[in-house]
Structures are given as structure tokens and as C-alpha cells.
Amino acid sequence: MVILRAQKRSIVLVPFPYQGHTTPMLQLGKILHSRGFSIIVAHTKFNSLNTLNHPEFVFFPLEDNVSAGLDTSIGNISAVITAINENCKVSLQDSLAQMMKDRENHGHVCCIIYDAVMHFSRSVANHLNISSMVLGTFSAFYMQTHHTILRLGAENSIPLQESKLLEPVPELHALRFKDLLIPVNTEIPQTVLELLKDISNIGSSIGIIWNTTEDLDHKSLSELRQLYKVPIFPIGPFHKIVPASSTSFLKEDTSCIEWLDKQAPNSVLYISLGSLACIEEKELEETAWGLAKSGQPFLWVVRPCSVNGSNWIEQLPNGFQDCIGERGQIVKWAPQKEVLGHPAVGGFLTHCGWNSTLESLCEAVPMICRPCFSDQMANARYITHVWKVGLELEEVNDREVIGKTVKRLMIENEGKQVRQRVLDMKQKLDTSMKKSGASYQSLSDLTDFINSFPL
Ligand code: UDX
């Protein structure tokens, strides 16, 4: 039966314009498109994505005015988020109002799905009388940390006492106060607390979609269901549901795959700190010597300008060049999912971004955790202490510690046990995606839920 466009349900996606957030939103778009929905993506001009990679979606730009004089470095991210939320509202509202009048071309706009960070979308949806759902691009346990920080703020417990840092947070299972990244010596600015409040106020949408699974996040999902009282659909890991087109902001260097083809199974350590984290020159140097000392082959992603004060790898120590070539490769940006799925890759030194964590778990690659900021501290704690599928890197500026940790994971007995646990986890995730598995069922529920919105 042919369904006319005017009778089709269209979903408007509003991604947050950073790699780690745009990727899961576009993956979700692909999943929902495969379930028969039309997909419209409202994207900022700031950090604009490559629309040509997704011919099945309709795109329209939002006037964000972000590049006009605002410091957009990662240190100023909360100001960028605030600016996007303030500036894009009118643009989204006007464009959607036009589209809703034009059913012939845009179908029936039945729902907005927005990244939790793009909370302005909720008021636009309310204004236009459209349903709104939220996408959680990080774990449910990380969302719970927002509520804890807000509670501590309300109780005037911030700044935290230094003596509390290693204590467990009573309501957060495995997490310590240290993992919340609350300042010890300064107050949290009121604007940041307001932002946390807006981001965690997701129960006022009609449902929440999460790039997570019951296997990884069950306790937190149950608690958040109690708190928010709206349906929650943990359908992840998204990248395993449908093959997605490239969502990379940077050009992938695929030459490393040929090099991996020549390496022994499980021998290579892959190193990447995601799309945002930067390191100091000292860490670059100590990591280089740590890798040299470990004796393991390595594939290392160093993004341009990700080492402070440097364009790329010109600050690598003299003598380390001998390790590059047969022993190791350095690239500016890798096809990460393909790399992690390659049989030669046996370990991942990661910043523990949520996408990298899921991608590593899905390929049964054990991790060495070097978290930098935001949810990465909490993710690292779950990797090392809850799922026990990785080791903590205890010192980032010490070549001896780095070299020993790499050996512990890649060749020692301890690493074998970690590898077995991550393999068990991968099998659980595989099962969850199969028919009658929890994520599969949740995706069916989500599809039925959206199809129940009136035409
Ligand atoms: C950001 C936050 O920093 C992270 O903590 C949060 O969980 C999501 O948003 P980012 O730092 O980029 O993301 O990390 P991550 O979530 O791991 O996402 C990085 C993505 O880039 C992954 O999908 C990864 O496959 C991809 N990538 C990374 C590449 O394709 N090539 C690379 O060389 C490195």
C-alpha cells in the first residue's frame, strides 16, 4: 500500500551540535526512518553537520547567532548551550509553523524529539501544540547526578568539603562525590545550576528515549521511571540497530585499517579521547613513552589542536618517531567503530565518552579509563567498578604507570579476566537487541507509542 506523504507521520529531530550528541540523534533518525517515519532535522548553523551524508532526511537550519563573538571553546560550553537555547527558539518555531501548514511536502509533523541539552524545543513544541520527547545521549546514571548536584546546591553543600570527595554518594550506587565533578573551592555559578535544572527537567515531555540498555543502566532507569512518571524507552546501543551513514564532523583516515590488517589478533591498543578533550604537552610525552615501554602495537588518534599549544604532533618527543610505522600509527581521526570491531584491536585507552563506551562494549574491547570531564568520570567508575570491564589509569603524567597499565590489560592475567567480562557484556547486549530482547522490545513499544499520536 502506498502511503501519501501528507498521511505520513513526520518527526522533527533537534540535535545538540557536537559530535558526541549529533551522532546518536542521527542514528535515532535512521532507526525511526526504517520504521516508516519521515525525518526532519533542525540543525544549528554553528558546527553544522554534513547533510549530504543523509539523503533520506529533510534538513533545515536554525539561526543560532552563536559564532558572533562568543567564545566557543569547550571551557565556555555552558555559555554556548545557553546562547543556543535562547537564540534558536524563534527560528525553530517559525520554521515548524510553516511546515505544519504544508502537509503535502512535510507530512504530518507529529512529534519533536530533542537532545536533553536543547531544552528550548520543549516550549516550542508546547506553543505549537506538538508532542515532545527527549533523547538522552548519555547514561541514565549520569542524569541522576544532575539531581544530586541540584540537591546539594539547595542544601548549600557546595563547595564540597575536600574530605568528602572519596565518600560514596548515598543515592548514586557506585559513584563518589569526586565523580560528580563538583568544585571544592568555589560555588557552582547560578547559571550552571539553572542549566542543570533545565536539562534534567525531562519528565515534562511525554516520553524519554535513551541510548542505553537495561543491562547497563537498569537500577537508574527504574529510579528515573519513578521520578519522571513518563514512559522511558531504553533502545540502545543505537549504532547496532541499523547501519548508519557516517556522522563524523572530521574526515576519517581509513588507511589505519590496512595497517590493522597486518597486526596479530587482540594485540593493538587503540587510543582516543573523543571529539572535545584536550591534553597538555606533558601528557602527550608521557603517553608516548608509556606506549613505547609497553611494547604493544598501538593506533593513536591525536586530533589537530588537541594538545595545548600545538597544531598536531610536533611536540612528540625525539626518539619516539622510531615507534611509528611498523609498531604504531598516529592519525587525526579514525573510523572508530570499524577500528573497535577489527580483530587486531585488543584494548582501548579512552576518555569514556558515552558513545565510545557503548562502541567498545559492543565489540567486547576492554578499556583503560582516562576520563576528562562531564559524564566521563561517572562512566569510568561504572566501567572499572560496576561492570568491571576496564582498568583505571591512575596517573596520566607518568610513563611508568601508563606502560604498566597497558601491559596489565593487554598481556597479564588480570587483563584476561577483564576481557572475559567484557565478552560476557557484549553477549548480553547482543541478546538485548535480538527479537524479544529488552532493547528490541522497547523499540517496538516506542514505535507503537509514536504511531498512537493522532494524525
Ligand atoms: C561528548 C562528551 O564529551 C561525552 O562525554 C558525552 O558522553 C557525549 O558527548 P565526545 O567527547 O566526543 O562526546 O565522546 P564520545 O561520546 O565518545 O563520542 C565520540 C564519537 O566520535 C564516537 O561515536 C566515536 O566513534 C567517534 N570518533 C572518535 C570517531 O569516529 N573517530 C575518532 O577518531 C574518535
Image (spheres, grey):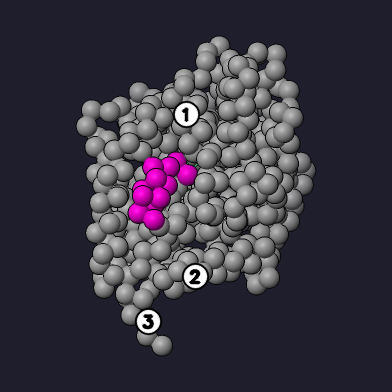
User: Could you say where residue 85 lies in the image, as x and y percent from the top left?
Assistant: 36, 38
Quadrant of residue 446 within the rendered picture: bottom right
Q: Report the front residue among 423 and 373.
A: 373
The residue tagged 2 is 451
Q: Main secondary structure of the magenta part?
A: helix
Query: What amino acid is at disc 2?
Result: Asn
Other residues around mark 1 within 10 Å, as few (<14) / some (14–19) / many (≥20): few
Secondary structure under the numbered disc 2 in the rendered image: helix
Which residue lies at the image location 44% right of the left edge and 57% below the top edge? Answer: 131
Q: Report the front residue among 175 and 245.
A: 175
Q: Which residues make up the magenta segment?
A: 116-129
Residues marked 1 and 2 touching at CB (< 8 Å): no
Secondary structure under the numbered disc 3 in the rendered image: loop
Distance between the Cα atoms at labels 3 and 2?
14 Å
Query: What amino acid is at disc 3?
Result: Ile
Figure disc tally: 3
Q: Eyeballing the image, is 313 above or below 353? A: above
User: Could you say where residue 105 lies in the image, as x and y percent from the top left?
Assistant: 26, 70
Which residue in the rendered view is the most extreme toward the left?
Answer: 68
Q: Eyeballing the image, is 199 above or below 37? A: above
The residue tagged 3 is 3
Ligand 1 has an atom within 8 Å of the beta carbon of the residue at disc 2: no
* Residue 171 visible in the snapshot: yes
Which residue lies at the image location 35% right of the left edge and 23% below the top edge? Answer: 309
> What number is the disc on residue 194?
1
* Marked residue nearer the N-terminal end (1 or 2): 1
Secondary structure under the numbered disc 1 in the rendered image: helix
